[in-house]
Image (spheres, rainbow, N blue to C red):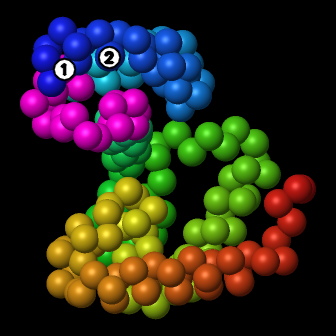
Amino acid sequence: MATSNFSDRLLALQDNLKSFAYTLTANRDDAEDLLQDTTLKALDNQDKYYENVNFKGWVFTIMRNIFINNYRRIVRNQTMVDQTEDLYHLNLPQDSGFDTPDGSYTVNEILAAINKFSPEYKIPFSMHVAGYKYQEIADKMGLPLGTVKSRIFFARQRLQEYLKDYDLNK
């Protein structure tokens, strides 16, 4: 695809991309940053675009992927990894967002429920909550990927079962 034609098509999408970025970020400044990152990434990778591919879909996919990767990076940076022997901490971000005693009570209820898990479920579940990807957990624990996914799934089910009677509208 000719460079000027590619650039023209990309410029024609800027308003649509800006709207989509605002939908993703809900913040005007972050949306502007996301739009700029997307435009630069599309220009850097224009040699990877094939003429028979949906151009608008290709660029929107770039934006969505940038947003997801940035979100994951933020979550990882805000996460503390529990190095204690008994995994007492849940590996939550430093600022849990709970300003009230009721909110803290909710976190304590969840921690108590997770601490009831056996280590084979507690460790992968805690790592997953901390933002690790399934493959990273599998590699660190020396387990097959399917086993890790199953254990996290069952831990999530158990957590829901433990907390089913808990009134979240207190």
Mark before the other along the chain sequence, 1 or 2:
2
Image: 140 above or below 5: below
Q: Secondary structure at mark 1?
A: helix
At x 67%, y 43%, the residue is: 98
Do tag 1 and tag 2 residues touch (Cβ < 8 Å)?
Answer: yes
Crowding at dot 2, Cα within 10 Å, few <14 / some 14-19 / many 20+, comes out as some
Q: Position of residue 6 (x, y in %)?
A: 23, 18
Which residue lies under the disc numbered 1?
Answer: 43
Q: Which mark is residue 133?
A: none
Image: 13 above or below 168: above
* Horizontal side of residue 78 vs 106, given as left or right: left
What range of the chain is rendered magenta?
A: 42-60
Q: Secondary structure at mark 2?
A: helix
Q: Position of residue 148 (x, y in %)?
A: 34, 82
At x 71%, y 83%, the residue is: 161
Q: Residue furthest front?
A: 52
At x 45%, y 62%, the residue is: 129
Q: Quadrant of the N terminus?
A: top left
Q: Which mark is residue 10?
A: 2
Q: Nearer the viewer, residue 106 or 35?
A: 35
Image quarter of residue 74:
top left
CA gap, disc 1 and disc 2: 9 Å
Magenta highlight on residue 124 = no
